[in-house]
Image: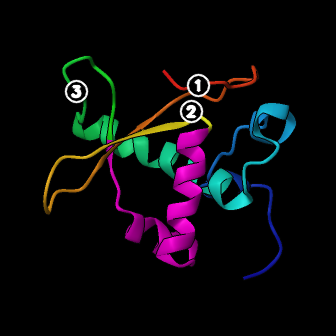
Amino acid sequence: MGRFKIHDIDNEQFYQIPKILFTSPAYKDLSNDAKIIYAFLKDRMELSRKKGWQDENGDIFLLFTQDNIAELLNVSTSTASRAMKQLKEHCLIDIVRQGLNKPNKIYIHRADARPIKTCT
């Protein structure tokens, strides 16, 4: 441990949270937990891309359980569930159930500055 050196900055990895989630009125009531989970999901999307996880439409999906999300964020499963529900209500994700004992597919949507009325 120690102070940052000029070469250290390039060696770190970061989660990226779109600024629009903080600046757009469309997302003003989105919790910080939900914003961080969105960053986790976007980061996890790269793994899905590498594994070729896409549906028949070419849409990338994730297999990431709420238990995994809760553990990563160090919150309860119910807190993670509430945050995921917020992301769904704000049209930032879709969740598709696959059936008994199979993880849900999660599809990520781009954040949009326009106020959201209904998800399509």
Q: Which residue is mark 2?
A: 91
Disc marking residue 55: 3
In front here: 39 or 75? 75
Residue 79 on image: x %, y %:
57, 70
Q: State the extent of the magenta-drawn residues as a range.
A: 62-89
Secondary structure of residue under mark 3: loop
**First of labels 3, 2 by sequence position:** 3
Disc 1: CA contacts within 10 A as few (<14), some (14-19) or many (>=20) = few
**Answer yes or no: do the residues labelled 2 and 1 have beta carbons within 8 Å?**
yes
Disc marking residue 118: 1
Disc 3: CA contacts within 10 A as few (<14), some (14-19) or many (>=20) = few
Seen in the picture, residue 50 relative to 109 is either above or below; the reply is below
Rounded to the nearest whole Å, what is the CA distance between mark 1 and mark 3?
23 Å
In percent of the image, x 56 and y 61: which residue is there? Answer: 82
- The amino acid type found where label 2 is placed reads Cys
Secondary structure of residue under mark 1: loop
- The label nearer to you, 3 versus 2, is 2
- The amino acid type found where label 3 is placed reads Asp
Residue 72 on image: x %, y %:
50, 71
In front here: 12 or 103? 103
